[in-house]
Image (cartoon, rainbow, N blue to C red):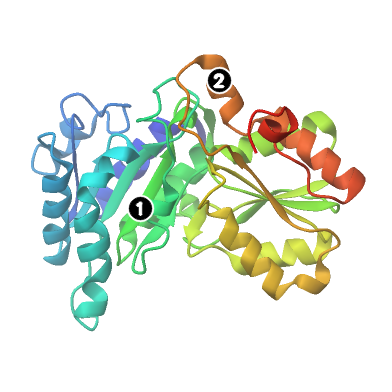
């Protein structure tokens, strides 16, 4: 065990899988000689060479399509999409082809490929480079979708994604790349896709989080001394229904904290499932804490308001526990929008 930044944990996971399996290769823009635009493949070219660590042209459509073909023929490519928004031009290869090969071939052809993408607001990249866009991939049968919340989960989920027999999308919270933490490497550090983790126990409410909202929820709970249980999903598809149900049946309340805008966010699926399967356990109406339905602002102070941070989370959860009613988000409380 040793301390690593999240970027280093991702690099370590890729290196360990490449050492263990000669069919694993990585490809993307600036990932070889430059070590990756965010240094998540630093040093891999020197160890594994240009056939397994491939710089590509600026053509997400081209190299994602190449990865689909390579995976169908026996390789395990890991594709890096610099910003998740750039995946838009390659969605056909991913959601129409890779995600459907197993189904269309009756299991004879699979696509064991990984698509990595940096996501999230908070670093001043502007509205075209700061989204999370989980809804682009989470409603596609045939894809698995994971998102780490710290260096350890980045290492464990990345190794699990590379090993998976089907395509996996890894949404990496860019603001957490510099975060440092203890990382258990080797087999002991590999996580299971589809399993959530309880990162804080409590009895008054369940907070379900993903990616960088996990840290924000933990900070809110500590600052306001909230008696809440925090369930870090880690896997969005297939999400750990039983872990969430077990927690809600204990606490009687559910709050989903997500970075995505209110409209079309992944938390709606969590609320729908819990309401239909554990309605009798609920003491209060469940609700979501989200970002507003606006583009991510560029200005630093506005961007800080956009993301559901510890202050907004503690404000809403405190009001919820005090009154039993669903609180209004900040943009409604302050009369900015409805």
Q: Quadrant of residue 113?
A: bottom left
Residue 51: percent from left, percent from top: 8, 43
In the rendered image, the quadrant that contains the C terminus is top right
Secondary element at image label 2: helix
In the displayed structure, 283 sits above or below 134; it is: below
Circle 1 sits on which residue?
Answer: 169
Look at the picture and state if 77 lies above or below 291. Answer: below
As drawn, which residue projects farthest toward the top? Answer: 300
Can residue 332 be seen here? The reply is yes
Residue beneath the point at 79% across and 29% down: 223
81 in relation to 25, above or below: above
Numbered mark located on residue 86 in the image:
none
Image side of residue 106 versus residue 50, left or right: right
| SS of the residue under disc 1 | strand
Cβ atoms under marks 2 and 1 closer than 8 Å: no
Along the horizontal axis of the image, is 293 left or right of 109?
A: right
- Find residue 252 and report its image quarter: bottom right
Asked whether the viewer can see residue 159, the reply is no
């Amino acid at each position: 065990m040793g301390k690593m930044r999240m970027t280093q944990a991702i690099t370590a996971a890729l290196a360990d899988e490449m050492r263990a399996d000669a069919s694993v290769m990585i490809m993307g823009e600036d990932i070889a000689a430059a070590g990756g635009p965010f240094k998540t493949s630093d040093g891999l070219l020197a160890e594994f060479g240009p056939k397994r660590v491939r710089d590509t042209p600026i053509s997400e459509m081209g190299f994602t399509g190449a990865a689909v073909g390579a995976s169908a023929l026996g390789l395990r490519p890991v594709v890096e999409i610099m910003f998740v928004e750039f995946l838009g031009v390659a969605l056909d290869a991913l959601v129409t082809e890779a995600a459907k090969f197993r189904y269309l071939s009756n299991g004879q052809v699979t696509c064991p490929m990984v698509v990595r993408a940096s996501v999230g607001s908070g670093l001043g990249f502007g509205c075209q480079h700061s989204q999370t866009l989980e809804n682009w991939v989470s409603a596609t049968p045939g894809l698995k979708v994971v998102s780490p919340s710290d260096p350890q989960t980045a290492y464990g989920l990345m190794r699990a994604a590379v090993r998976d027999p089907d395509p996996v999308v890894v949404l990496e919270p860019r603001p957490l790349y510099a975060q440092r933490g203890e990382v258990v490497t080797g087999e002991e550090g590999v996580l299971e896709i589809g399993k959530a983790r309880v990162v804080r126990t409590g009895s008054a409410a369940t907070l379900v989080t993903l990616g960088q909202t996990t840290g924000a929820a933990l900070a809110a709970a500590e600052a306001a001394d909230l008696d809440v249980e925090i369930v870090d999903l880690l896997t969005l598809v297939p999400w750990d229904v039983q872990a969430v149900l077990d927690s809600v049946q204990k606490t009687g309340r559910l709050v989903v904290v997500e970075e995505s805008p209110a409209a079309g966010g992944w938390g709606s699926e969590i609320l729908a499932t819990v309401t239909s399967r554990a309605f009798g356990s609920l003491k209060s109406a469940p609700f979501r804490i989200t970002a507003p339905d606006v583009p991510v602002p560029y200005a630093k102070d506005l961007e800080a308001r956009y993301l559901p941070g510890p202050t907004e989370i503690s404000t809403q959860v405190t009001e919820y526990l005090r009154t039993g009613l669903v609180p209004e988000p900040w943009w409604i409380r302050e009369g900015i929008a409805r």
